[in-house]
Image (cartoon, grey):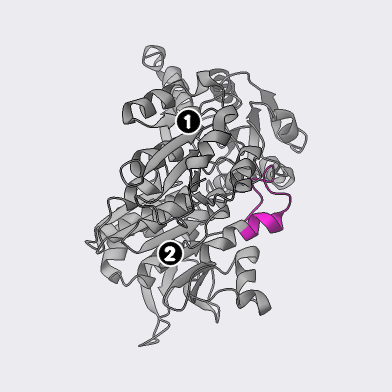
């Protein structure tokens, strides 16, 4: 094995990229021009890797099958891990056994980034909040790059950043697991609720992965947290609070002695400057927020406090929030048919996100489409909210029975496809109702991705109104 250069990620390093998802392919593309050499590997069957391998061949990057990896490792100094692959994966263990350091793509992106980074995490809401933070920087005239778990690999954004720019990164617990020196200028944790318990043995271990976002921050950095979330707030209490070495700013749904940003009477977001003139400043009214639901008010508060921590002017922040629009597959209205509104919330892949989505429709009757591949989470609380808020639920996917078991009052039906689910939901709905696709599960049992699931939902809705258009 070549002697390690400790991850300088320059011509002295020779990298192995593990995993050929979006992040892994982006890492290979960026690093091939910066490092001495790059090779890639993946355990997936060859037929599933065909497109990725063709892309890599065009780049001149060599693929190493796992059974030929040992000899290739003799020339490797660092490994870059895609977020979908756990640190305890046997392939990763083989690399570590050779004494080769393993870094996450987020860590590598940080090491090659000349600009300050804002990092956003949370169980739900982090994509919307990340996009909003980027919009606030843009509204303030800053040159901003947005990437990470939001959909485009962070390394693609950081490699193009200049020292005077800002980078806004959505980071998942998977991405944070294998960071080492990743140190955002501003970090934000929105919430920590049950999710990914098929990967983490306990909520404590899941929360610890999230808390790594501020692990390397110091006095010159800022941590922003949601004081109303018990797990996030625990980072400020007792010995736990000593973990946060950065300046800590908190937001909450009511005034609190620790809150820098809070809601007054549930109607107005108020900023209490931590330094300088202490008089509270009205930021904007809740009814000015162009996003549905109380959970999105919290997302906006997190984004606003991040922007204030970064020194953005208040008027630009106000303008950025007012002009922001919902992202695809996140409480996205896709049509109205016969007086029934159809809403795509396909990105709701855990029970907490479904609960927040259902509560965002006030008292309107809901026909819910839910189900898919569960992630080790408990559906009990989601079942209670379905029973109280939904008139009916149409269940799809591998773990439909798990959800059906916790629904006590709403009518339950099952469907074998998205087309069938939408047709059954349409039969159950009446004018004034909402048909809400909010699955609470991963999509990979029936669909290529959450986006694919949402697209098929929208196509099925179009087919209700215009069968010809829906078939296009």
Q: Earlier in the sequence, mark 2 or mark 1?
A: 2
Residue 300: say if magenta.
Answer: no
**Which picture quadrant has residue 27?**
top left
Towards the viewer: 308 or 21 = 21
On the rendered structure, is 350 left or right of 141? right
Span highlighted in magenta in the image? 192-208
Q: Position of residue 17 (x, y in %)?
A: 47, 40
Q: Residue 357: x and y, percent?
A: 55, 45
Q: Is residue 146 visible?
A: yes
**Residue 70 relative to residue 158: left or right:** right
193 in the magenta segment: yes
Give the camera-side residue of 67 and 408: 67
Residue 374 as seen in the image, left or right of residue 444: right
| Crowding near the residue tagged with mark 2, few <14, some 14–19, many ≥20 C-alpha atoms within 10 Å | many
Residue furthest out toward the left: 141
Residue at which label 2 appears: 184
Q: Secondary structure at mark 2?
A: loop
CA neighbours of label 1 inside 10 A, class few (<14), some (14 to 19), many (20+): many
Residue 471, x across and y down, in percent: 41, 13
Q: Which mark is residue 454?
A: 1
């Amino acid at each position: 094995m070549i002697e390690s250069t400790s991850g300088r990620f320059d011509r002295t390093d020779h990298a192995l990229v593990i995993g050929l998802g979006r992040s892994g392919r982006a890492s290979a593309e960026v690093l091939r021009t910066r490092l001495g050499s790059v090779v890639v590997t993946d355990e997936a069957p060859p037929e599933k890797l065909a497109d990725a391998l063709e892309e890599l061949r065009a780049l001149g990057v060599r693929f190493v099958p796992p059974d030929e990896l040992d000899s290739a490792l003799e020339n490797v100094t660092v490994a870059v891990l895609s977020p979908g692959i756990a640190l305890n994966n046997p392939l990763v263990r083989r690399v570590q056994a050779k004494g080769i350091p393993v870094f996450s793509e987020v860590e590598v992106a940080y090491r090659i980034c000349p600009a300050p980074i804002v990092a956003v995490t949370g169980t739900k809401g982090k994509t919307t909040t990340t996009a909003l933070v980027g919009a606030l920087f843009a509204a303030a005239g800053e040159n901003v790059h947005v990437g990470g778990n939001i959909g485009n690999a962070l390394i693609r954004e950081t490699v193009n950043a200049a020292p005077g720019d800002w980078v806004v990164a959505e980071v998942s617990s998977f991405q944070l697991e294998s960071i080492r020196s990743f140190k955002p200028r501003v970090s934000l944790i929105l919430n920590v609720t049950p999710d990914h318990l098929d990967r983490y043995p306990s909520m404590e271990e899941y929360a610890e992965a999230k808390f790594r976002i501020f692990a390397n921050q110091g006095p010159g950095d800022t941590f922003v947290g949601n004081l109303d979330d018990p797990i996030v707030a625990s980072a400020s209490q007792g010995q736990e609070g000593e973990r946060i070495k950065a300046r800590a700013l908190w937001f909450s749904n009511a005034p609190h002695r620790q809150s820098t940003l809070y809601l007054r009477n549930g109607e107005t977001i108020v900023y209490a400057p931590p330094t300088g003139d202490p008089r509270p400043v009205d930021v904007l009214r809740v009814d000015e927020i162009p996003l549905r639901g109380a959970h999105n008010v919290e997302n906006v508060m997190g984004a606003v406090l991040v922007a204030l921590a970064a020194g953005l002017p208040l008027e630009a922040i106000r303008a950025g929030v007012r002009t922001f629009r919902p992202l695809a597959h996140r409480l996205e209205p896709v049509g109205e048919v016969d007086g029934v509104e159809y809403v795509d919330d396909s990105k709701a892949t855990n029970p907490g996100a479904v609960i927040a989505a259902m509560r965002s429709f006030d008292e309107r009757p809901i026909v819910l489409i839910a189900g898919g591949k569960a992630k080790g989470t408990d559906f009990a609380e989601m079942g209670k909210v379905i029973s109280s808020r939904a008139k009916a639920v149409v269940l799809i996917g591998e773990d439909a029975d798990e959800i059906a078991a916790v629904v006590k009052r709403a009518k339950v039906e099952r469907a074998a496809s998205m087309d069938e689910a939408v047709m059954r939901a349409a039969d159950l709905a009446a004018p004034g109702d909402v048909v809400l696709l909010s699955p609470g599960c991963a999509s990979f049992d029936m669909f290529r991705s959450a986006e694919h699931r949402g697209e098929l939902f929208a196509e099925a809705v179009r087919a209700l109104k215009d069968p010809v258009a829906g078939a296009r």
